[in-house]
């Protein structure tokens, strides 16, 4: 019986063409902004990943200059080059992922909090209580970590 009342309530509103066009433009605009921000993120992350790996490349070059020449005759140059290239490219990719996770994590958290605060006063109270609980939990755990332990 409850479902019937719900459907009657939904059917009470009419949707006109102007609302449909507004929603369509909002969706198209959101998709365009998503593409733009993804492009900018990719451009910025490439430079960050390169900068993270550049220092390691220079350090590795200095280390290889100090290696005796006999090392290269005993070991395959291809194996050495493959290992170095793999490690440096992994470092570069992980540097980009690290920046992506940190920035997107904070941005998504802030966006979700703002949406919840804007749309629901109950969410405001819940978020504030969760924030205070988190702060209290952090202080308690920091106090426990500082307590001396008896080691047998």
Image (spheres, helix red, strand yellow):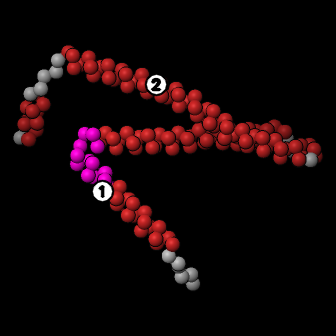
Which quadrant of the structure image shows residue 5?
top left
The answer to whether any part of residue 80 appears in the image is no
Residue 132's place in the image compared with 98, above or below, is below
| Residue 104 rendering spot, x and y as whole percentages | 47, 39
Neighbour class for label 2 at 10 Å: few (<14), some, many (≥20)? Answer: few
Q: Which residue is drawn at 37% across and 39% down?
A: 111
Q: In this view, does 142 lie to the left or right of 5?
A: right
Q: Residue at x 41, y 68 (%)?
A: 140
- Which quadrant, please, contains the C terminus? bottom right
| Residue 35 rendering spot, x and y as whole percentages | 46, 24
Q: Name the residue under label 2.
A: 35
Q: Is residue 78 one of those drawn in magenta?
A: no
Q: Name the residue under label 1.
A: 129
The answer to whether any part of residue 135 appears in the image is yes
Please tell me whether the stretch drawn in magenta is mainly helix, strand or loop.
helix
| Residue 48 rendering spot, x and y as whole percentages | 62, 36
Q: Is residue 128 one of those drawn in magenta?
A: yes
Q: Is residue 113 left or right of residue 106?
A: left
Neighbour class for label 1 at 10 Å: few (<14), some, many (≥20)? Answer: few
């Amino acid at each position: 019986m409850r479902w019937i009342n719900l459907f009657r309530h939904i059917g009470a509103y009419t949707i006109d063409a102007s609302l449909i066009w507004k929603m369509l433009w909002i969706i198209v605009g959101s998709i365009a902004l998503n593409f733009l921000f993804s492009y900018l993120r990719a451009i910025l992350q490439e430079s960050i990943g390169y900068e993270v790996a550049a220092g390691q490349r220079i350090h590795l070059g200095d280390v290889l200059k100090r290696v005796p020449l006999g090392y290269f005759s005993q070991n395959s140059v291809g194996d050495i080059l493959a290992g170095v290239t793999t490690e440096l490219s992994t470092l570069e990719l992980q540097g980009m992922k690290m920046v992506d996770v940190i920035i997107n994590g904070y941005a998504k958290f802030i966006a979700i909090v703002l949406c919840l605060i804007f749309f629901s006063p109950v969410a405001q109270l819940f978020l504030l209580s969760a924030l205070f609980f988190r702060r209290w939990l952090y202080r308690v755990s920091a106090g426990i970590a500082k307590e001396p332990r008896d080691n047998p």
